[in-house]
Amino acid sequence: MSAMSNNEILAQLTEILEQRKGAAPDSSYVASLYDKGLDAILKKVGEEATETVMAAKDVASGGDKNKLVYEVADLWFHTLVLLADQNLSPDDVLQELARRFGVSGHDEKAARK
């Protein structure tokens, strides 16, 4: 079996997250998150962000880098659930990142004001 490309992984995951919308809450973890609503999804994103920060601090102190990869994967996953819940997609985020290419970070931040 050949390895999936990054784009294929993201597309497949996005499709699965969309399929879970409206599914019975006991049918999957994602369906249960959707059923609990936005606050539950936001809580998971916050928890995973905190765990990512803690893992990064551990790596900076000589800890296992794989733990950071694991936590970032959890953070990305729950962020993708959040996007899907809000009827957005990874493409929306990628388009925003593409828009920022060639723009100074300082200029981009100043333009938000």
Image (tube, grey):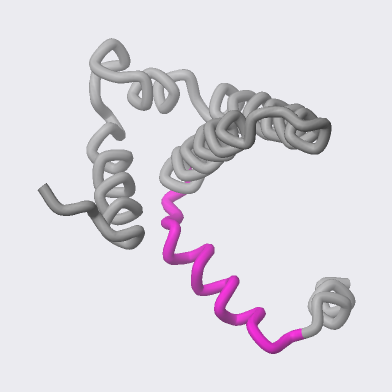
Magenta stretch encompasses residue 97: yes
Q: Tell me what residue is drawn at x 45 percent, y 55 percent.
A: 88
Q: Tell me what residue is drawn at x 45 percent, y 38 percent.
A: 81
The span shown in magenta is: 86-103
Residue 68 image point, x, y percent: 62, 35
Q: Tell me what residue is drawn at x 32 percent, y 39 percent.
A: 17
78 to the left or right of 99: left
24 to the left or right of 100: left
Write down the quadrant of residue 60 in the picture: top right
Instruction: Please identify the residue farthest to the bottom as the structure is shown.
Output: 102
Q: Tell me what residue is drawn at x 74 percent, y 34 percent.
A: 59
20 to the left or right of 33: left
Closer to us: 67 or 107: 67
Closer to us: 5 or 23: 5
Residue 21 visible (yes or no): yes
Closer to us: 19 or 68: 68
Vertically, is 61 above or below 7? above
Instruction: Please identify the residue farthest to the top as the structure is shown.
Output: 26
Write down the quadrant of residue 69 in the picture: top right
Residue 77 image point, x, y percent: 47, 38
Magenta stretch encompasses residue 25: no
Residue 31 image point, x, y percent: 33, 24
Residue 42 visible (yes or no): no
Closer to us: 65 or 74: 65
Main secondary structure type of the part rendered in magenta: helix
Vertically, is 51 above or below 15? above
Instruction: Please identify the residue farthest to the front as the structure is shown.
Output: 62
Write down the quadrant of residue 18 in the picture: top left
- How many marks the image carries: the answer is 0
Question: In the rendered image, which quarter contains the C terminus?
Answer: bottom right
29 to the left or right of 81: left
Residue 22 image point, x, y percent: 27, 29
